[in-house]
Amino acid sequence: FGGGILAGVSVLISAGPTREPIDPVRYISNRSSGKMGYAIAEAAARAGAKVSLVTGPTALKTPPVNEVTWVESSEEMYRCVMSKVPFADIYIGAAAVADYAPETIADRKIKKNQSEMVLRLRKTQDILSAVSASPKRPFTVGFAAETDNLEDYAREKLATKALDMVAANWVGRDKGGFENDDNALFVCWNGGDTYLPLASKKTIAEQLIRLIAERYHAQNSA
Ligand code: C5P
């Protein structure tokens, strides 16, 4: 696949969910399976890229890439990704990073001795925005999952997070996305957009890697 369109290019990919600890036995997480991110990592490797994958907990087989680093919380993912950004030509943020995490983590298991309990959450750091704001910034690709106004939110994300590309998928409409083996994407960048119709995540990943390679090379030869 790809005829080496990313030969010699270093690609950093984040994938999977994060787990935000509440106490030593409990956490907050989401339904991300990691399938899309892993498929992108594999497609990038087959296109000749040097791939580093930073992954939250998944049930998937480790893909054949140069380096795989397992993390759990959004904070760990943030630190790991930022430590690798200086070595990346392209960053693809495919992880479903938790937006909020418990403000404090209990040292001991919380007992069920109250009829109600309140969990205070704080906003997590936006890894994608931090990558795009970093010095020696890589070509930065973000994901969006929306239930409505997908195209508008995707374009807004491109602008507000200062990204080079956004890949957006519908959720909750039998159109792929979370936990599914298939996916469909709306992809936009500065100056263009396209639809990748419902197909296996493997096919979608290959098409996305082609688009990323095209835009990356166009920017670097400009
Ligand atoms: O703003 P929203 O969460 O919808 O944006 C999704 C994109 O931002 C994804 O690419 C996701 O990996 C990234 N993200 C991040 N850090 C966060 C939240 C989202 O990198 N704390």
Image: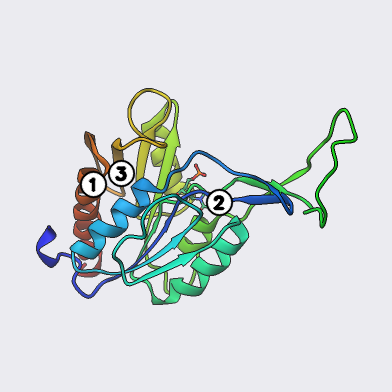
Q: Which residue is mark 2?
A: 18
Quadrant where the C terminus lies?
A: bottom left
Secondary structure beneath label 2: loop
- Secondary element under disc 1, as helix, strand or loop, is helix
Dot label at residue 202: 1
Colour theme = rainbow
Q: Residue 188, which numbered label? A: 3
Q: With 65 as the anchor, is 122 left or right in this view?
A: right
174 sits to left or right of 203: right
**Is the CB–ligand 1 distance for label 1 below 8 Å?**
no
Reading the chain from its start, which is encountered first: label 2 or label 3? Answer: 2
Q: CA distance from mark 2 to mark 3?
A: 26 Å
Q: Nearer the viewer, residue 173 or 157?
A: 173
In what element is the residue under mark 3?
Answer: strand
Residue 114, picture quadrant: top right
Q: Dot 2: few (<14), some (14–19), or many (≥20) neighbours within 10 Å?
A: many
Residue drawn at 43 percent across, 37 percent down: 145
* Residue 43 place in picture, x, y as percent: 23, 57
Q: Within 10 angstroms of label 1, few (less than 14), some, or many (20 or more) residues?
A: some
Going from the N terminus, do you reach mark 2 or mark 1 first? 2
| Front in this rendered view, residue 113 or 220 | 113
Q: Residues within 10 Å of mark 3 (few under 14, many from 20)?
A: many
Viewer-side label of 2, 3:
2
Pinpoint residue 129: horizontal percent, then vertical percent. 51, 56
Residue type of the residue flagged with mark 3: Cys
Mark 3 or 1: in front is 1
Identify the image quadrant of residue 72: bottom right
Task: Tell me the kind of residue under disc 2.
Answer: Thr
Give the residue drawn at x 79%, y 53%.
104
Which one is nearer the viewer's eye here, 220 or 37?
37
- Ligand 1 closer than 8 Å to the CB at disc 3? no
Q: Position of residue 12 (x, y in %)?
A: 38, 65
